[in-house]
Amino acid sequence: MLKINNVSKIYLKGKDKFTALQDVSLEVEKSDFLAVVGPSGSGKSTLLHLVGGLIQPDSGQVLFRGNDVYKMNSKEANRYRTKNVGFVFQQFHLIPYLTVYENIKIAETESERKNGKIEALLEKCALLPLKNKYPSELSVGEKQRTAFVRAIISEPEILLADEPTGNLDPENSKILMTLIKEFNEDGGTVLLVSHEPETTNYATKIITLRSGKRV
Ligand SMILES: Nc1ncnc2c1ncn2[C@@H]1O[C@H](COP(=O)(O)OP(=O)(O)OP(=O)(O)O)[C@@H](O)[C@H]1O
């Protein structure tokens, strides 16, 4: 479903060039739960952002169902990012002046507006009683579960999770990882970046990056 062919990404740091990813190739099947591991600075987040259509590679291709994500026109690329891909980040990135419900509502696409799925997902994630609260009134576990619901509300095919348990205690990590695993078992593809060995236990495949290269 996803094919990453020889992608490289170079960042400019002042006058210096820094190669964050070098010639990385990877194939991801629909049923995969892929964990990307490696030392800090090895290019894991960069790889996830490339898959999510967020940063352009300097060379190589990211193919989703055979279509190059970086050759799509802006309408198609926008659709790919909003409809096919969901993101969960370590820092939640919730909008502080919107409630739990509103944070999720704005991520719904036209087609989902009719089926009233938000309430069911809030219930599943033990968030329903908190639906009118603001992010500042939530625990970190609740914030991350809100971010998770927001990521999957539009039924994306791929969930990209970048250190999603980085700020969570072991109990909340387990709850979140179980939800992510269920998303995978229900047919969603997961790409997870993590430092924590317990979270990679949920994966069906693991790849390692070191200094921007796949090892
Ligand atoms: N926007 C940027 N501009 C310049 N350099 C960057 C930028 N983003 C990342 N880098 C550099 O590219 C390298 C890879 O970064 P990346 O965030 O992909 O690594 P990572 O493996 O996810 O690291 P960590 O585990 O610490 O989050 C790092 O050395 C980082 O400093």
Image (cartoon, rainbow, N blue to C red):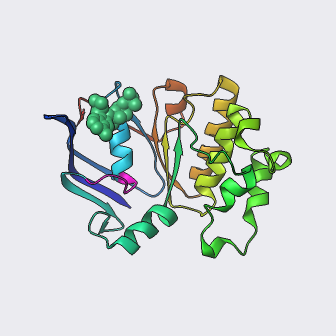
Split into quadrants, the picture shows ligand 1 in the one at top left
Query: Is residue 55 located in the magenta-colored stretch of the structure?
Result: yes
Q: Quadrant of the N terminus?
A: bottom left
User: Where is residue 41, by image quadrant?
Assistant: top left
Q: Is residue 46 left or right of residue 114?
A: left
Please report the residue visible at 36 percent of the width from the left and 67 percent of the height from the top: 65
Residue at x 65% of width, y 38% of height: 176
Does any portion of residue 155 appear in the rendered image? yes
Look at 56% across and 58% down and name the residue there: 187
In the shown orientation, is residue 167 left or right of residue 69? right
Measured from the top left, where is residue 29 in percent x and y?
A: 41, 56
x%, y% of residue 58?
18, 51
- Where residue 114 appears, as percent x and y from the top left, is 72, 75
User: Which range of residues does the magenta coloring cover?
Assistant: 51-56
Instruction: Report the residue at 63% width, 54% height from top.
Output: 150
Front one among 36 and 74:
74
Is 16 left or right of 68, judged from the image as shown? left
> Quick check: can you spot residue 43?
no
Tell me which secondary structure the magenta stretch mostly adopts: loop
Asked whether 53 or 175 is in front, the reply is: 53
Answer above or below: position of 52 versus 75: above
Quadrant for residue 107, please give it. Answer: bottom right
Residue 175: x, y in percent? 69, 36
Say if the magenta span includes residue 201. Answer: no
* Rendered view: 185 above or below 44: below
Horizontal arrangement in the rendering, residue 148 relative to residue 83 (left or right): right
Q: Is residue 84 above or below residue 11?
A: below
Total numbered labels placed on residues in the image: 0
Quarter of the image that includes the C terminus = top left
